[in-house]
Image: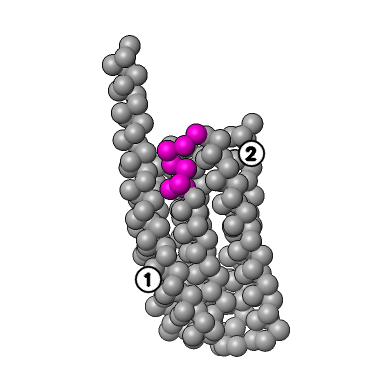
Amino acid sequence: MDDCCSGKADALEALRHRQSATLKVVLAINLIMFLAEFGIGLLANSAALLADSLDMLGDSLVYLFSLYVVARSDRWKAGSALLKAGAMAAFGVFVLCETGWKLLHPVMPAFDWMVGTGVVALAANAVCLYLLTRHRQDDVNMSSVWLCSRNDIIANVAVLGAAFAVLTTASAWPDLLVGAGIAILFLRSAWSVFADALQTLR
């Protein structure tokens, strides 16, 4: 019986170690991409790139929370998920406000910067999603992390689509629409994570 319990404890510890290692890697990737994409978004006058960079920052906070609670109880993990939901919702509101400002003060975004940055961000997030997929079903903590990473892929594809639409239409509207769309995605994901966390707490 003791050997059985010891084996389960060792397996759980090994799982937590793998989760922590994965979270550290994706945290580093997202912090680097946030700094790069935010700066380029400002230079390129792109609402979509700014929205995507804030998504990277939000994910970095998510990974920090997740790393902190990876070895704690389900209640701690659910509490972390609630904090993530709040952060995601806050960024969603921020991006909506930023998009609204650009609607009132339109500026043509730089197509080449949008495409180059979008491709690099997509590659970075694809690596993160690949690393997190094997932990998707581990617990509510890792499930919410995987959901954030999946949303990043969707946002990156949308940014690239906006870039080509800006080029073909010679209009800033595609960039603004994608910025608003990413913000709405933040809000929907925040609600999903919030609901899962509440269910775990109950």
Q: Residues within 10 Å of mark 2 (few under 14, many from 20)?
A: some
Can residue 150 be seen in this snapshot?
no
Residue matched to label 1: 120
> Where are the magenta residues, as a range?
66-73
Which residue type carries mark 1?
Answer: Val
Question: Does the rendering let one see residue 81?
Answer: yes
Task: Give the residue drawn at x 52%, y 40%.
Answer: 77
Up the image or down, 50 lies above or below 80; here it is below
- Residue where numbered disc 2 is placed: 198
Q: Quadrant of residue 117?
A: bottom left
Q: Give 171 or 153, whichever is nearer the viewer.
A: 153
Q: Residues within 10 Å of mark 1 (few under 14, many from 20)?
A: some
The answer to the question of whether label 1 and label 2 lie on touching residues, with beta carbons closer than 8 A, is no
Amino acid under disc 2: Leu
Numbered circle sitting on residue 161: none
Residue shown at 40% from the left, 42% from the top:
135
Give the alpha-carbon distance from disc 1 to disc 2, as whole Å. 35 Å
